Image (cartoon, grey):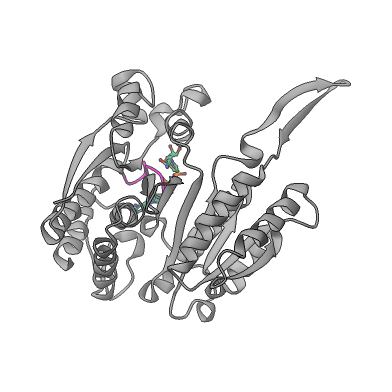
Amino acid sequence: MPNYKIAVLSGDGIGPEVMIEARRVMAVIEKKFALTFSCTDANVGGIAIDVDGKALPEATIQICRDSDAILFGSVGGPKWETLPPNEQPERGALLPLRKHFGLFANLRPGICYPQLTHASPVRPDLVVGGFNMLCIRELTGGLYFGQPKYTREENGEPVAVDTMVYKRSEIERIAHVAFRAAQGRRKKVTSIDKANVLENSVLWRKTVIEIAKQYPDVALNHLYVDNAAMQLIKAPKDFDVMLAENLFGDILSDEMGAIAGSIGMLPSASLGNAKPGGLYFGLFEPGGGSAPDIAGKGIANPLAQILSVAMMLRYALGETAAADVIEAAVQKVIQAGLRTGDIWSEGTKKLSTAEMGAAVAEAI
Ligand code: NAD
């Protein structure tokens, strides 16, 4: 019977509340699929600052290193916002975790369920029947990491410099992730760039076109980033896999999350290099943050955290059938009219965090 070692980093705010529900679902999966999870809890973010003196303690890194995957909650909150930026929960934990484990590929599904189109701010006739896209964002290159990076006085005024750098190999590896993902979906990749202005984008487009030749079953098209921002709102159903570099992907994936409806529904995965057999080491987490405004009230939507477990099963553990079952169970509870407050509408039944977790476990 396979035994998977999972580092569980619940973090702050609603993190621990929704993680309890993810664990409840994992317990049901263990029984149904004859597999076991050996979970080790570790501190991260604000709780780690309070207990261990820093947002990402060495002991937590070690536990992650010894695991098959990292299941992450969320970090941060008002209590730690006055700390120096580099010591704050998000910057002090998430960015170093990504860097430490070389998690260069961020996968964010943007799913608007047919029953939840009312939660989308897009014109109803454009999202009729819902939509299902996947944003693949390069996570460790580009403008966020390029050197030099500074602000200094020049000729009597401050000048700020950020540098956008991509190596061909960095574009190749993220393109492979996108094409492989598309093969398991509707077989379409939309690559985002600004090749009419940026040298980086010229190399990006050229490289993506070359990699596409290895995936003749996948259709490739290109959009300039400004047009992509418009098309997401005008024709969200046209997108299958959207591939973007770090900055463009950061902005467009948030837009995609917003048009999908509630952030409480959206999981994400940050993956490193593919291992032999096509699986990845990765960090799996909800798309939203620690939601301090609703923390402790038992009303947070646990579905993003539960769907993060499904992504972990699919991408890190190769347990595709178990991932499918969780995703189907989430659809089933939505279909049955069960809702947490963030997605509730007239005529549906409002549940607490724990009741929603139990409903998904029951549906499995
Ligand atoms: P947020 O995502 O925490 O909250 C934004 C809004 O969405 C809030 O109204 C919140 O109640 C709602 N929301 C989020 N998740 C929800 C859920 N599961 N169910 C129902 N409603 C949900 O973003 P924010 O308010 O900008 O940030 C709050 C804190 O979270 C900050 O400290 C920020 O640094 C941190 N943060 C952490 C991560 C992370 O850990 N990856 C990501 C984003 C923000």
Which quarter of the rendering shows the C terminus? bottom left
- Secondary structure mostly seen in magenta is loop
| Residue at left offset 41%, top offset 52% | 268
Residues shaded magenta: 287-295
Residue at the far right in the pictured view: 155
Left or right: where does residue 134 sit relative to residue 209?
A: left
Q: Position of residue 270 (x, y in %)?
A: 44, 46
Above or below, 68 against 113 in this view is above
| Residue at left offset 66%, top offset 39% | 143
| Residue at left offset 69%, top offset 28% | 149
Foreground pick, 228 / 106: 106
Quadrant housing residue 296:
top left
Residue at the far left in the pictured view: 31
Above or below, 56 against 279 in this view is above
Left or right: where does residue 340 sit relative to residue 261?
A: left
Q: Position of residue 139 (x, y in %)?
A: 54, 44
Foreground pick, 108 / 221: 221
Above or below, 325 against 335 in this view is above
Above or below, 209 against 274 in this view is below
Left or right: where does residue 59 sit relative to residue 263?
A: left
Q: Looking at the image, can residue 127 be seen? A: yes
Q: Looking at the image, can residue 258 be seen? A: no
Q: Position of residue 37 (x, y in %)?
A: 18, 46
Q: Position of residue 67 (x, y in %)?
A: 28, 37
